[in-house]
Amino acid sequence: RTVEEQSKVNKSLSTIRLYEFRLCPFCVKVRRKMHALNVPIEITDAKKEPFRQELLDGGGKIQVPCLRISEEGSVKWLYESSDINKYLVERFG
């Protein structure tokens, strides 16, 4: 990406957050895809409060990885590393 394109990507990431457990192999899979695509999404440790409760209240379960996507006034909670990686490739690939 050009610097301008990367700047647009970075700006769009302000509405996305990844909930994870650091050593979870599925979370590692998502972080690797984020790195490969150069998408520095905010990462939160779902073992710690208040993030654990946010994940439970918003997504309905404590399962990681989970991508919280806030767009056009609605929030989507995307679970499963393969689904998250597919979303990342479709949106930022």
Image (cartoon, helix red, strand yellow):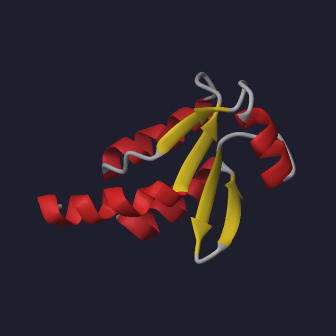
Left or right of 3: which side holds 10?
A: right
Residue closer to the observer: 3 or 90? 3
> On screen, 40 above or below 7?
above
Residue closer to the observer: 41 or 53? 53
Left or right of 54: which side holds 3?
A: left
Residue closer to the observer: 32 or 69? 69
Q: Which corner quadrant of the image does residue 50 belong to?
A: top right
Left or right of 43: which side holds 26?
A: right
> On screen, 50 above or below 15?
above
Q: Quadrant of the C terminus?
A: bottom left
Left or right of 87: which side holds 26?
A: right
**Can you name the residue that lies furthest to the left here?**
2
> Residue at the location (52% across, 43% down)?
30
**Can you name the residue that lies furthest to the bottom here?**
72
Give x and y (percent) for residue 5: 21, 66
Give x and y (percent) for residue 34: 41, 46
Q: Which corner quadrant of the image does residue 65 belong to?
A: top right
> Residue at the location (61% across, 48% down)?
81
